[in-house]
Image (cartoon, rainbow, N blue to C red):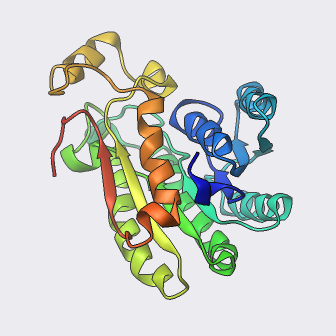
Amino acid sequence: MIEDLKGLRALVTGSSTGIGAAVAKAYAAHGMRVVVHYNSSEDKARAVVDAIKAAGGEAHALKADVSSTAATVELVEKAAELLGGLDVLVNNAGALVKRVRIADMEDDVFDEIVNLNIRSVVMASKTALPHLAKSGKGCVINLASVAARNGGGPGATIYASAKAFVLNLTRGMAKEFNEQGVRVNAVSPGVIATPFHERFSTPEMLETMRKTIPMGRLGTADENVGAFLFLASPAMSGYITGQSIEVNGGQVMV
């Protein structure tokens, strides 16, 4: 048990499956009070909440399409109301949306990628800032990607560029939010065996990616959890802001 996490209040966006679900469960296991956010996967979100409650933790499920500013603002405010404030915001929601090469890119796909992976992070963080500042222990943890470092795979250039935006946004937010005592960091996962790749990557693509990883295998959602626990803990990371933790099996070393 990480003692200084007990009682902290967290909103984890996109936490019905994958890394987000693993983080929500881990936070609750360390005594944090958690809001599990979902958009279309209500059954899976409810399953995460039920698992947390069965283990003696506190969790709530909220639905929102975070590609919409209005819905994102409402989500954050509802989460703060449910929990009586916010100490931790994890901007995990995001998706590749669709593999499209630049030569074939259309406005609607471009906008969907940008709105989901960039606008949601900006607007959720903006809305959460007063609550995080009030807590005295506030922090934001953004989800980036190894794609931000290498340009992404086939048809993923705009997604990868959005994640590169998130990395630089993290640095800028760290400077701005520090004025109100709020730390901002990022976690950059590599190729992780989650529903993300089940949806967007073929077995052949995954095998090609696996061969570029020095550890010789894909990662798991649970192997990302330690970084999120570390960054949420003032005792362990209270003097860390504007940084990104790479969780990629050595695929990219920076």
Give percent across and percent down for residue 94: 51, 44
- Between residues 237 and 17, which one lies in front from this camera angle? 237
Give percent across and percent down for residue 152: 26, 39
Q: In this rendering, would 36 be left or right of 212?
A: right
Question: Above or below — where is 34 with respect to 46?
Answer: below
Q: Residue at x 67, y 79 (%)?
A: 130
Q: Residue at x 66, y 62 (%)?
A: 69
Q: In this rendering, would 81 be left or right of 96?
A: right
- Between residues 175 and 138, which one lies in front from this camera angle? 138
Q: State the residue lying farthest toward the top.
A: 203
Task: Please say whether residue 233 is visible from this viewpoint.
Answer: yes
Give percent across and percent down for residue 164: 31, 56
Which of the 4 image quadrants contains residue 209? top left
Q: Quadrant of the N terminus?
A: top right
Q: Residue at x 42, y 48 (%)?
A: 227
Q: In this rendering, would 215 be left or right of 200?
A: left
Q: State the residue lying farthest toward the bottom.
A: 179
Give percent across and percent down for residue 222: 47, 31
Task: Please say whether residue 161 is visible from this viewpoint.
Answer: no
Question: Above or below — where is 190 with respect to 66?
Answer: above
Q: In this rendering, would 74 be left or right of 158?
A: right
Question: Above or below — where is 169 with respect to 109?
Answer: below
